[in-house]
Image (spheres, rainbow, N blue to C red):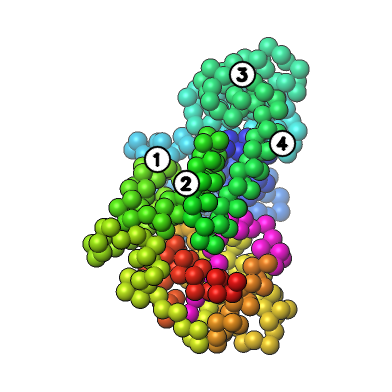
Amino acid sequence: LNQNQSNGLQSSGSGWYFYNTTTLSFGANNFRQKWGDRKLEDNWRRSNKRSNALNEITNETGDTVQATTAQLMDPNFYKKDIPRTKEQKDSANIKIQNAYYDLGTIYKEQLSERQRAIQTFEDLLKRYPKGIWNLETYYQLYRLYREEGDQRRMQEYANRILREFPESDYANIIRDPKYLEKLEKLRGRLGSMYDMAFTNFNKGEYERVIQAADSALTAFDKDDLLSKFALLKVMAIGATEKLIVYRKALEDYIAKYTAAPEKERAVEMLEYVKGLMGETVPDEKVAENMVEKAPNEDGYVFDESATHYYVLIGEGLPELSQMKGRISNFNSTMFSLESLSIKNLQYSTTEDLIFVQGFQETKKAMDYFNAIKADTVVFEGVNLTMTSQFVISQPNFTRFYQTKQIPPYMQFFTKNYIEKED
């Protein structure tokens, strides 16, 4: 489901009113229209407070300052915030639409005032007949009129959804009331398939990864997880095929999944492969370049006696401070005798890299790796399939952070650490 659809299908809201800046802005404007810009103080509703409020303005930092008499008398003072360019007007219209939709959702979900919700959603459609929230608003009104027992209006909005958005999840729900239940079962199956494929990838069983990805991409035609599955397949291709084949797979992925959050990583991988192709013979396999020739190509060298780090990277982790707090609690409980420290670095625009220092040899680092990976408290609520965890020596870490290429190192890690434990 896309982000907009999931908002409507689940809570149909955007969180508590006071957490949403758009809704707060909308409400604040209504308040100012009625009462003016008044200080929060006793007897604020008294009319003789109004003249004082008019002298107060907000500067660019959000602080309240006194407006001069000259400013209050200058028409341009009141015109400066009027949107004039197309970009400014488009931005203002988007904010208004978001505010309308959020207000309607508050009336419906949090205040249980169906009539006001209906009026707000209807006003949104009248003001923006081709707006950004049309599909979700149609579905909200479809549900509201169903709750009101108004079959005619309910069917009107059902027909709009089927006519204007026939391929949407909302249209499928109207056609089949059990659609969501079936969809959740399918997504559960897909998630299990991905988890298994990811495990197989870390074990180096790349052919099984490719087979699982092909099955998933054939059986499922619409799911956020498919772009991740497709990239996992590309990475498996990179581990088993020639560089030129890997490059083509990456280019095809980037062209197909233009809006996927994994596209940025695919682009980075493509640039890396292009660099390799300028230095290696095209007939050599990527797996050989990335693992067997590591000292020459990626610079990774296995040194069992070197200082090691535990590394965690991933999307969907809790807030950085919270995640580091969980790891700190784990260290205090399970590894209190070790002198461990937790650090973090920026890995990408959407991901942080957390690493734990203090392991003087490979065995201690791997004991830690196996223990924390299995800890359900540390990773409570975390989708582990969206994370990468590994142990890395200090010299290799420097090289890894320069390239920021996970697949090559994961193959090196699997061969030199995981497989040697088995």
**Classed neighbour count for the residue bearing mark 3: other residues with Cα under 10 Å, few (<14), some (14–19), many (≥20):** many
* N-term-proximal mark, 2 vs 1: 2
Magenta highlight range: 375-394
Amino acid type of disc 1?
Lys
Neighbor class of circle 1 (other Cα within 10 Å; few <14, some 14-19, many 20+) is: few
- Kindly identify which residue carries mark 2: 230
Give the mark nearest the N terminus, 2 or 4. 4
Q: CA distance from mark 4 to mark 1?
A: 37 Å
Marks 4, 1: nearer the viewer: 1
Please state which amino acid type lies under the numbered disc 4: Glu
| Dot in front, 2 or 3 | 2
Which residue matches tag 1? 256
Of helix, strand and loop, which one carries label 2? Answer: helix
Q: CB atoms at circles 2 and 1 under 8 Å apart?
A: yes
Residue 216 location, quadrant: top right
- Please give the label number shown on residue 109: 4
Where on the picture, by quarter, is residue 101?
top right
Indicate which disc, 4 or 1, sits on the residue closer to the N terminus: 4
Q: What residue does disc 3 label? A: 157
